[in-house]
Image: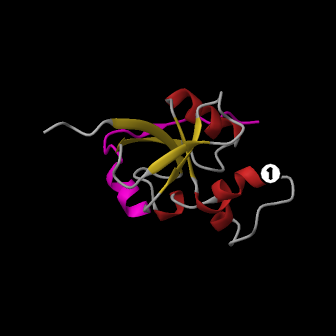
Amino acid sequence: MSQARMRTFYRVARTCPPGNDDYTTASERRGGAPPPPYVPPERHRSWYDGLSAYDTIAVARACAIRNRGKLGSWIVRYDIPEGRGITWELFPGDEEDGHYDLFGDREELKSYQDPGSCFKVEIPSR
């Protein structure tokens, strides 16, 4: 029997291990609000259903720093088997930046977190 192929992603989190607040979409963080007018239609699925993830620690770290810790200051690794319910897509417009959206059951996603994988990011002061 062959092993399922794994894909590794990194997410920015407020705590380690991540709490339920770390598994919210852009819409949920804004009380269910629709996307602002500047968000193009091809990103609406991301707004409502996607959880941001990155293909390298460096890109996740840069996101945490760029957002000055508003999304969190921990980087958490997820090893997700292909074909198991969690899917991913490149974030529209960020194909070069390693930004993905994860879709699927959040409890299942939590089960793919690597328990020893939290990395604290130093957020520079202004």
Tell me if residue 34 comes above or below residue 62 in the rendering.
below
Queried whether the magenta region covers residue 37, the answer comes back as no
Give the number of callouts. Answer: 1
| Residue nearest the observer in this picture, 110 or 69 | 110
Residue 66 lies, in percent from the top left, at 70, 37
Colouring method of the image? secondary structure
Residue 50 lies, in percent from the top left, at 58, 55
The stretch of residues the image draws in magenta is 106-126
Q: Please, what is the three-letter code of the amino acid marked with disc 1? A: Pro
Position of residue 53 in the picture relative to residue 67 (left or right): left
- Give the labeled residue for mark 1: 40
Residue 1 lies, in percent from the top left, at 13, 39
Residue at image position (66%, 50%) is 70
Residue at image position (54%, 35%) is 121
| Residue nearest the observer in this picture, 19 or 88 | 88
Mark 1 burial class by Cα count in 10 Å: few <14, some 14-19, many 20+: few
Which quarter of the rendering shows the C terminus? top right
